[in-house]
Image (cartoon, rainbow, N blue to C red):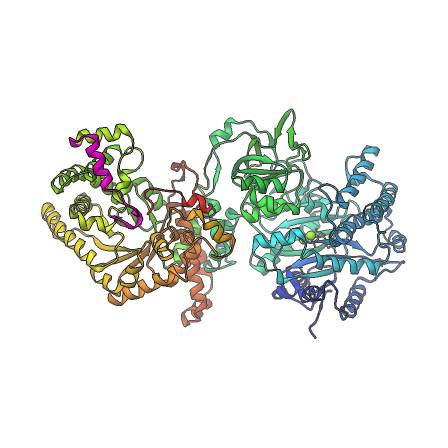
Amino acid sequence: MPKRVYFFGGGKAAGKSEMKNLLGGKGANLAEMARLGMPVPAGFTITTGVCTEFYEKGGKLPKELTKEVEKALAGVEAIMGRKFGDPADPLLVSCRSGARKSMPGMMETVLNIGLTSATIPGMVARTNNERFVWDSYRRLIQMYSDVVMEKSAGIEPAEGKGIRQQLEHLMDDLKDSKGYKNDTDLTADDLKELVASYKAKVVEVLGKEFPDEAMEQLWGGVRAVFQSWNGKRAVSYRRIEGIPGEWGTAVNVQAMVFGNMGDTSATGVAFTRNPATGDPRFYGEWLPNAQGEDVVAGTRTPNPLNEATRSSGTEHLPSLEKSMPAVYQELHAIRDRLEKHYRDMQDLEFTIEDGRLWMLQTRVGKRNGPAAVRMAVDMVEERMIKSTEAITRVTPSQLDELLHPILDPKAEKAAPVLAKGLPAGPGGASGQVVFTAADAVKWVEQGKQVILVREETNPEDVEGMRAAVAILTARGGMTSHAALVARGWGKCCIVGAGEMDVDIAGRKFSVGDVTINEGDPISLNGTKGNVYAGELGMVVGSEDNPYFYSFMKICDRLRTLGVRANADTPEDAAKARGFGAQGIGLFRTEHMFYGKGTEEALFKLRKMIHAKDEAERRAALDELFPHVKKDIKGTLKAMEGLPVTIRLLDPPLHEFVPRADDERQKLASSLGLSLDELDARADALHEVNPMMGHRGVRLGVTYPEVTEMQIRAILEAAAELTKEGKKAMPEIMIPVTCDVNELKDQKEIAKRVHAEVAQKFGVKKVAHMFGTMIEIPRAALKADEIAEATEFFSFGTNDLTQMTFGFSRDDVGGFAADYLEKGILPADPFQTLDQSGVGELVKTGIARGRKTKAKLKIGICGEHGGDPDSVTFCHKAGMNYVSCSPYRVPIASLAAAQAAVAEKKAKPAKKAKKAAKKPAKKPAKKAKKILKKPARKIVLKAAKRPVPKPKKKTAKKKGKKKRGRR
Ligand code: ADP
Ligand code: MG
Ligand code: MG
């Protein structure tokens, strides 16, 4: 029979930190801390296996558990020197949940179990502190009636009508009537009176007496924790985080230690480093004369842990460092030990009982993107971890946070601050105010951007917090629930903005005489904690972040897959280069005819399109030539020394036909035609199915002179740059091919033009490569033949996905959502590469191509090049590089590094063994150097547009027509 209960305490433990699956994170780490000889109150963990049994038995605990629990409890009693339920000197315990992965605030904990009318007098006698005992008792009633009697009984009270809130109202009323400000002002007699009214209220609301028997309380607590695993908010949190329901939770029963015994007692939460910035200094919050819940729930504004890390807003509050220096030193030493032991940032809970420190929890702390990056870099430098591990400490989406928008500093300077709070989740956001989680979800479904405003942090709000762009609360500290969750998601968040008067029912909040109603826009600066009325502009953040550069250096060193960018202008090219792109994987020629400043070139292109014969077309092409050459030259120059893949004209020509009357008129007169004649020519270009029509290489086959002009422009641009002493590396790429003969046809043109250009410039050779896109399934299948005529392949997975699925990229929005909702497809194949279908074609194409030409250079230039999962696929498939939008380059680099490291780990080769033996000295030194000299120069400031977020876009939006994105 499997062991169901694991004991810890007195410097020993049956469990250890590796046993998270069985003991949950909290239980495993409590055991580990006990083993390390740290001051942990004795206790025991009931395994997650029992949770499974509990649900299998339809909500009943296995009989055998009773004996094991009784035995473990006796062990706790022996160490603590007092007995559970003993009227003379009672032991009290807490009953705590703990899943494999931490789910902050999602499940239930009950403190002070074992206080009954029989044990209260003994407790008072021992502690000689009547007030403390009655305070503990009223807390027990509050938690127990909420968790055990209401929630786990399946009662769903109306908003604001929960038993816990009703009891809190009773306390507030009592405080008001006595003229008190703080909970701590309540005297023992006040609390006795309060307890009596609590008990009456419990009977009134729940129809049941509060249990007055210690063992009954304990088992009620255990059952409630198991029950809470399937509670509403835990289930929705699990769904968002992808935590399987089968895991179950463990239950930890632990001897109580009391932070609420007076001014020499306290409780707190700390992080071994700052989870919002990565600052390596010990960081945390504490409250004197309080129990843990008080700090976590954010009902009182907590004090700073030490002098060094005070944030603005806590200047006037006492630090633990000053208030209890000896205990602080002890805690600091434990902090150092724990971080070394776990080799990662820890999130700690501690309690001080009458001057004595107790550790109640440690776990790997959640952090946001900027903090994750800084910690990874710092820990390599401190030799705590190796660089191969450092890159696994940052997720692609955390890195993405560094590229996230912030409020435009100029707009911010001009705007008056409406309210100030604690900077819980950095970055900026603007949105319309909503006051409930349900409204947040609803409004976002209607396509609005909302900021969720709440009185205080509330774990029931997760769905709404997820939907909102940002979260703002009037109460709570940096370690409050909202802060933790928002940071985990990289969401902008401000908590504890105390000047705000929130009226949830009235759907408004006010600060002084300013009132903000539901739907009004506000803006948050989550880095500073500032709230503004109205919508402020946004800019891209993260410039001048040396940790970002250092981290990217580490990624670049570890990855084997190249990363290029898709860029069509010298500006984009420079930006991409700044982000570390090793070249351009896709330069779309047609882009020079789109957008502002392209009118002249576009006009000439239109002339070419409407030409009636080769002679007319050639004349138009001659006019167009200087524009094309200039454009290509600019980008080749910006990417000097790096390869630039230039794709020849790809879209169907009718896309360029003018629609506006004045433009048609202008074109007609320039060509010496009547409007009717022009329209007739344009009509001739009309196609029923242009996506599969006269486009790509097919244009070059019917109009060789179009190919000729483009190749001449490319080679002359390169030759001119070479003359200027600049290294140009153009790669000519033919789109939409399906057969080698198309390529042979085009290559003939390239050869002839090359000879002419070489002669014109008096050189033997103009360096370039000739290759093709693989974007038609047939091309992938015929890759062996196609490789004969080419030096490189670039998988155009946008079109390849379109043609493999038979889903029109322009029309997929009409049905994609249904496919995802019904689970017919696991993901939008245009966002995440369909590895089993389209991926098979990619692999086939690579294998067949390389069979013909082993050195064939292979890359990808679809939207997928910036999707982390797809990047991993490309690495495994043996590509040379991926190419993605400039802002995705860092993410692709990280994904590529992670893929390379994972692959090495999987191969237990000799090399890897050797490397493991080497001390971590070298990389540490290297990292230091890197930190000092950021090699990448990112000109984010120049980028005045917000970072594109290709991920979460709705399928509908994606499906919209977008020119020039083939
Ligand atoms: P959560 O998972 O929500 O953090 P915990 O089980 O850690 O819940 O408990 C909630 C609070 O109660 C924490 O602040 C914790 O430190 C405190 N607490 C839990 N057990 C004890 C105990 N035995 N003695 C004193 N405080 C405790
Ligand atoms: Mg809890
Ligand atoms: Mg906790």
- Residue 28 appears anywhere in the view: no
Where residue 785 appears, as percent x and y from the top left, is 23, 64
Q: Is residue 478 left or right of 569 when viewed as pictured?
A: right
Q: Does 867 appear above or below 181?
A: below
28, above or below 567, in the image:
below
Residue 685 among magenta residues: yes
Q: What stretch is highlighted in magenta?
A: 671-695
- Along the viewing direction, whichever of 607 and 460 lies nearer the viewer: 607
Residue depicted at x 24% and y 36%? 602
In the foreground, 917 or 23: 23
Residue 302 located left or right of residue 623? right
**Residue located 18% across and 29% down the image:** 669
Q: Which of 583 and 311 is in front in this view?
A: 583
The N terminus lies in quadrant: bottom right
**Residue 233 % position (x, y):** 65, 51
Q: Can residue 589 be seen in this view?
A: yes
Number of numbered labels in the structure image: 0
Seen from the viewer's position, the closer of residues 779 and 394 is 779
**Is residue 620 rendered to the left or right of residue 803?**
left
| Residue 901 magenta | no
Outermost residue toward the bottom? 1
**Residue 831 on image: x %, y %:** 42, 51
Query: Where is residue 303 shown, x and y percent of the image?
Result: 68, 41
Q: With 211 as the anchor, is 682 left or right in this view?
A: left
Quadrant in the picture for residue 882? bottom left
